[in-house]
Amino acid sequence: MEYNPRYYEVRNIDGLRYCHCGSERDAISLCEMHPGFTYVTVLLPPTPKTVDVPYVRVSPDLELPMQQVLPQSELEPFITNYHD
C-alpha cells in the first residue's frame, strides 16, 4: 500500500477556503475555535515514477566561449572589532 500525502483545507461558513493545515488536529482545532467552519481532506497525487529522458549530444563548437576573468577588486579587507 502506497502512502498518499495529504493536507487539510479549512473552510469558513460560506464554504470558502480559510487556510490549509498539515495535520488534521490543527484543522479540527480551527473548526472548534470558529463555529460553522468545516474541513476537508485533500489527497495529493502519487509521486511520479522516475523516467529516462533522451538527449542529443551536440558538437563542441556550439558551446559558449570561456568567461573572461574579472579585474581584481579594490576593496579594503574587512577588519573585525575596528572602531574609528
Image (cartoon, rainbow, N blue to C red):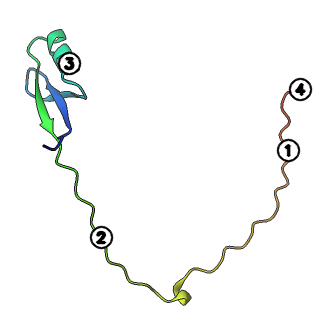
Mark 3 — residue? 25
Residue 66 lies in what quarter of the image? bottom right
Which quadrant holds the C terminus?
top right
Which quadrant holds the N terminus?
top left
Q: Are marks 1 and 3 in contact (CB under 8 Å)?
A: no
Query: Of residues 55 and 16, which is closer to you in this image?
Result: 55
Amino acid type of disc 2? Asp
* Up/down of 25 relative to 72, above or below: above
Task: Give the Cα separation between the discs numbered 4 and 2.
Answer: 59 Å
Q: Are marks 3 and 4 in contact (CB under 8 Å)?
A: no
Query: Of residues 13 and 78, which is closer to you in this image?
Result: 78
Amino acid type of disc 3? Arg
Mark 4 — residue? 83
Residue drawn at x 18%, y 23% is 24
Where disc 2 sits, the SS reads loop
Mark 2 — residue? 52
Mark found first going from the N terminus, 1 or 3: 3
Mark found first going from the N terminus, 4 or 1: 1
Horizontally, residue 60 falls left or right of residue 53, namely right
Where disc 4 sits, the SS reads loop
Horizontally, residue 29 falls left or right of residue 14, namely right
Q: Are marks 4 and 1 in contact (CB under 8 Å)?
A: no
Residue 3 lies in what quarter of the image? top left
